[in-house]
Amino acid sequence: MTTLLLRLAGPQQSWGVASRFGDRDSMPEPTKSGVIGLVAAALGRGREDAVDDLAALRFGVRVDRPGRLEVDFHTVLDVAHAPGRDGGPARVSSDPIVSRRAYLADAVFTAGFEGDAGMLAQILAALRTPRFPLFLGRRAFPPAEPIALPDRAPLGPPLREAGLESALRAAPFVVRGRDRRPTDPLRLALECPMHEAELIIADQPAPGAAFAVREFLPRGIRHVMIVPADLVLVESGGANDG
């Protein structure tokens, strides 16, 4: 059993599951569909390509720093509206439309995929030399650090011969500069069977070209807490230490 660990850190991140029209939400931690989209971009896959092999991996997240939920308001002018019921042409409205867009500020997560070792090694290589630009849930939100961990200690290796929960528990917690050492338990959000789930969200890519048709299925999540005394703390001066 192999797990690939990833570090998702940036000034802004957004991981929506129910965004519609002018209301763009964000979950408190990265979604499976969002991180699979990031991985698909690294692999060079387009929206029309299937991601069934990536969707089959088990996914989990450790919330290293939850950040703050912020909301921006955007105003859009000259919006094209769909044709009316009478079949007339589309019209452009001069009335402004305001959209609400939520995001996480200054959050840090350790994410993990559990599955076939060969597939995980391919993903790791792609994240180090991505085909397309990578972003944290929204194109305007690039990562502040490399997503792929280094191969050597203290931060690596990214590939662990362990199950998802064990690998996330053992992943180093990075203390950098003025960062405060954790005093509160850290939350793990682990993919699980539906009968064990504490939370169900629709972020499991459906078979086929899920991102082209925007079709996502329900997925079960259970939460586990890690006390600070059980964390592996690493003093770090940069994301590529090791």
Image (spheres, rainbow, N blue to C red):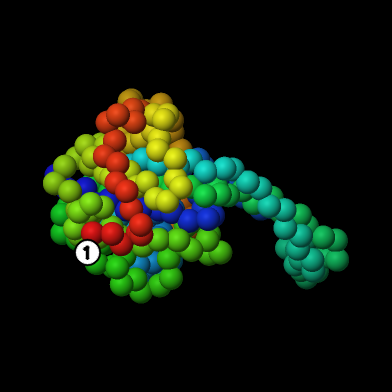
Q: Quadrant of residue 68?
A: top right
Q: Which residue is mark 1?
A: 122
Q: Quadrant of residue 38?
A: bottom left
**Residue at (30, 29) in percent of width and height:** 229
What is the tally of numbered marks visible in this picture?
1
Q: Above or below — where is 36 with respect to 122?
A: above
Residue 108: x and y in percent read 43, 48
**Residue toward you, 106 or 188:** 106
Residue 218: x and y in percent read 42, 39
Residue 178: x and y in percent read 46, 47
Q: Quadrant of residue 129?
A: bottom left
**Residue at (22, 37) in percent of width and height:** 166
Quadrant into which the N terminus falls? top left
**Residue toward you, 16 or 157:** 157
User: In this view of the protein, can residue 57 be seen by the observer?
Assistant: no
**Residue at (15, 54) in percent of width and height:** 117
Residue 128: x and y in percent read 29, 68
Left or right position of 195 against 83: left
The residue furthest right is 94
* SS at circle 1: helix
Which amino acid, mark 1?
Answer: Gln
The residue furthest front is 178
Pointer 1 local density, CA inside 10 Å: few below 14, some 14–19, many at least 20: few
Q: Above or below — where is 166 with respect to 9?
A: above
**Residue at (52, 43) in percent of width and height:** 67
User: In this view of the protein, can residue 84 be seen by the observer?
Assistant: yes
Quadrant into which the C terminus falls? bottom left
